[in-house]
Image: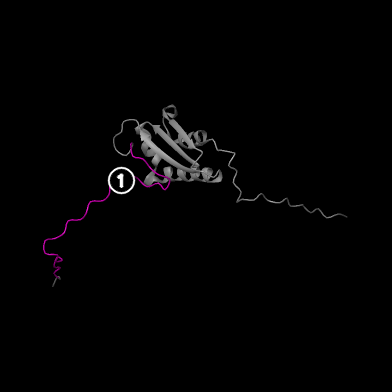
Amino acid sequence: MSLNRSVQKPLPKLGTKSPAVSPDYVGLVRFLIQPFLESPQSLSVDCEMYHTHKRVWIRIAFDSTDKGKVFGRGGRNIQAIRTVIAAAADAAGHSVYLDIYGSNGVGRDGVSFDEEGEERLPPPKPKERRGNGSRPVVKSRSR
């Protein structure tokens, strides 16, 4: 009688990065974004790789009517897409930047985003100060 024991193979090391292999960023972005679009042929993807700095710039454009579906409620869809792209770039030893452009340039379509997903907005305006520096008086209600 023999015991049926499975022999475990050693797992690959997770910390190793292969700089020679680069992900297909254009294909990955198309795969992730096209399901959200009413007209997938409107999607335009441009990818620039800078090998000296190990940076990847991805620019996408699509019809502004599909903006809501691509971004999702509260930006959940686009943040998930960014996370997947960032994970693929990190595995290849790259940093990735995703810029999203719209077809008409109105609203948020033309706003650029960096890898953390924050909009590049103008700095906040300083709050107006009161002349005498005093706080407003709060009166208590008596019944």
Residue 12, image x and y in percent? 66, 49
Residue in the image at 64% along x and 51% along y: 13
Residue in the image at 53% along x and 43% along y: 88
Query: Does residue 70 sit above or below 5 in this rendering?
Result: above
Q: Residue furthest right?
A: 1
Residue in the image at 39% along x and 37% along y: 100
Query: Does residue 46 sit above or below 128 in this rendering?
Result: above
State left or right for residue 6 relative to residue 78.
right
Which secondary structure is most common in the magenta stretch?
Answer: loop
Residue in the image at 22% along x and 54% along y: 126
Residue 51, image x and y in percent? 51, 38
Residue 56, image x and y in percent? 47, 39
- Quarter of the image with the C terminus is bottom left
Residue 20, image x and y in percent? 59, 39
Q: Residue furthest front?
A: 52
- Quarter of the image with the N terminus is bottom right
Magenta-drawn stretch contains 127: yes
Q: Residue furthest left?
A: 131
Q: As rendered, which of 8 and 98 lies closer to the eye?
A: 98
Q: In terms of image quadrants, where is residue 127? A: bottom left
What span is in magenta? 110-139
State left or right for residue 42 relative to residue 3.
left
Going by the numbered disc 1, the residue's amino acid type is Leu
10 Å crowding of disc 1: few (<14), some (14-19), many (20+): few
The residue tagged 1 is: 121
Colour pattern of the rendering:
one colour
Q: In terms of image quadrants, where is residue 99? A: top left
